[in-house]
């Protein structure tokens, strides 16, 4: 049996976490998508997608299922920025090879600020971002991936945009918000 830090571990335990580290690396590189189903469950709990994305970095692996169907997945205990603990399920969707020579697929392009888009049909959706003072209705794009057309997804760029909208709403930046969507303000009822 191989040893790690003086403790004998079964081979299966040494491999445990490999899928988790792969998923963490891809998310850190902005190579992720959030499915509509997950987005709806988060919305029911007043959680924006970016909060779960940010919690993954320091998340604790609960279970790893490399043989899960239709995609390998991990369950992770995460702390959201506000301290709320959640359990998140992350799947690893393997992408098919590029269809055209030279098509961008590597993370180095992401680090230089070029977003790698998921191939698929693009659809528009109105998304509500709620804060204590405002509700902002914005039009965003979802993609139905060619590699997994089971549901539309938000790409990393859209998740970041949702975070930006929330931050501008928290600051009360009405000019910015109005340029990007419809703004509804809460009123006090006497």
Image (spheres, rainbow, N blue to C red):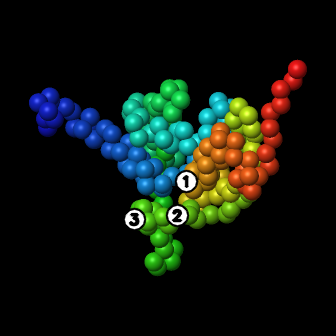
Q: CA distance from mark 2 to mark 3?
A: 10 Å
Q: Is residue 104 visible?
A: yes
The local secondary structure at tag 3 comes to: helix
| Residue drawn at the location 75% of the way across and 56% of the way down | 179
Q: Quadrant of the C terminus?
A: top right
Residue drawn at the location 41% of the way across and 41% of the way down: 57
Name the residue beneath numbered marker 3: 108
Residue 64 drawn at (x, y percent): 40, 37
Q: Residue furthest bottom?
A: 101
Mark nearer the N terminus (2 vs 1)? 2
Tag 1 or tag 3, which sits nearer the N-term? 3
> Where is mark 2, residue-wise?
115
CB of mark 2 within 8 Å of CB of mark 1? yes
- Residue drawn at the location 50% of the way across and 77% of the way down: 100
Among the 4 quarters of the image, the one containing residue 13: top left
Give the spatial CA distance, label 3 vs label 1: 16 Å
In screen coordinates, is 57 left or right of 159? Answer: left
Mark 2 falls on what kind of element? loop
């Amino acid at each position: 049996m191989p040893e790690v830090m003086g403790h004998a571990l079964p081979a299966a335990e040494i491999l445990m976490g490999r899928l988790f580290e792969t998923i963490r690396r891809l998310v850190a590189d902005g190579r992720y998508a959030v499915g509509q189903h997950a987005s709806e469950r988060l919305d029911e709990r007043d959680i924006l997608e970016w909060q779960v994305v940010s919690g993954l970095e320091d998340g604790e692996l609960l279970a790893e299922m490399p043989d899960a169907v239709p995609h390998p997945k991990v369950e992770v205990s995460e702390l959201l920025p506000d301290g709320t603990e959640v359990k998140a399920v992350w799947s690893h969707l393997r992408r098919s090879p590029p269809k055209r020579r030279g098509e961008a697929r590597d993370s180095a392009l992401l680090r230089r600020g070029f977003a790698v888009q998921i191939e698929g049909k693009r659809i528009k959706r109105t998304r509500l971002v709620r804060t204590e003072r405002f509700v902002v209705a914005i039009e965003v794009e979802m993609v139905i991936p060619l590699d997994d057309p089971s549901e539309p997804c938000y790409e990393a760029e859209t998740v970041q945009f949702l975070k930006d909208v929330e931050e501008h709403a928290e600051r009360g930046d009405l000019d910015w918000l109005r340029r990007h969507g419809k703004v509804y303000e809460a009123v006090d009822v006497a």
